[in-house]
Amino acid sequence: MMWCAVLVALAVLIWPGNKSGRLYRLAYRGRAVDSAAINEPRYAGSPRVGVAQVITSAIARLRGGGTLVEAFEEQSSRRFATQRITVERLITVFEQRRLPDESPAQVLEAARGVTAAAVLSDELGCQAVPCLEAVLTAYRQMRLMQNLRSQACAVPKATVGLLSALPAVTVALGELLGARPLAFLLGSPRGVVCLVLGECCYAAGLAWMRALLKGSGL
């Protein structure tokens, strides 16, 4: 009788119907499985990982067997209205994921590059992965050049800010020391002439420095 009871217990445990029913409910008690959620692809949120990382993830998705549209749909929070890559859609995706130090101009350049790669792949039949890798390399080089330019111009910009505030600081110190520079600048003809000439030179210097910074792309 004891062996019969043991065999019956083992049969209950290993029987296919009970395994797929009772044991499944014991292991997943309290969890509701939504079949629609399983069949429908779910997209993650939009953490700001950067444009380069978005393109890198798209390349990995393409190597895994996905399409170009699917690769960038996974980087967004929704599907595209049509199975087509456009600059506007890529700008939306990149804006959701770009880093704080990535500018809209960089996002636009990346979107144009990816769109050109998509058009080249569709019309000429070439593989999309090498095209996206070329876009990724160009984007990283652009970011590197802009970072190096920003670092090179950081000290001159700080010097310009200090020199811009120096005239006002000098006048304030003169007033504290009792030299009364404001009375001279505003209360005598020679002072007014000096004030006007100084303001003209000050404005010309600021305009010149702004033109230099603008010419460097900052």
Image (cartoon, helix red, strand yellow):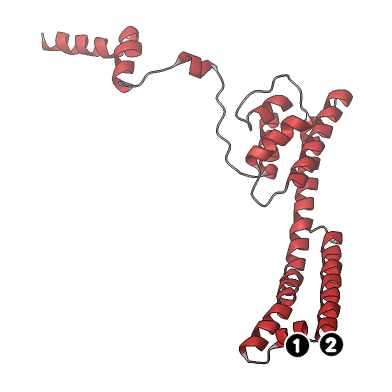
When asked about the image quadrant of residue 75, the answer is: top right
Measured in 3D between alpha carbons, the distance from the residue under mark 1 to the one under mark 2, in whole angstroms, is 8 Å
Residue 96 shown left or right of residue 34 in the figure: right
Answer few, some or many: residues within 10 Å of disc 2's Cα (few below 14, many 20 plus, some between 14 and 19): few
* In front of the other: 75 or 134: 75
Q: Quadrant of the N terminus?
A: top left
Work out whether residue 128 or residue 195 is closer to the camera in this orientation and state it.
195
Q: Residue at x 77, y 37 (%)?
A: 111
Q: Are marks 1 and 2 in contact (CB under 8 Å)?
A: yes
Q: Position of residue 82 (x, y in %)?
A: 73, 19
Work out which quarter of the rendered image holds the C terminus and state it.
bottom right
Q: Is residue 5 above or below residue 152?
A: above
- List the residue tagged with mark 1: 184
Helix, strand or loop under label 2: helix
Q: Residue at x 84, y 61 (%)?
A: 216
Disc 1 secondary structure class: helix
Residue at position x 81%, y 37% in the image: 112
Amino acid type shown at disc 2: Arg
* Up/down of 21 relative to 49, above or below: above
Which quadrant of the figure has residue 133? top right
Seen at 84% across and 87% down, the residue is: 190
Q: Is residue 27 visible?
A: yes
Q: Position of residue 66 (x, y in %)?
A: 68, 25
Kindly identify which residue carries mark 2: 190
Above or below, 179 against 129 in this view is: below
The residue furthest left is: 1
Instruction: Residue 38: give x, y in percent of width and height.
Output: 50, 18
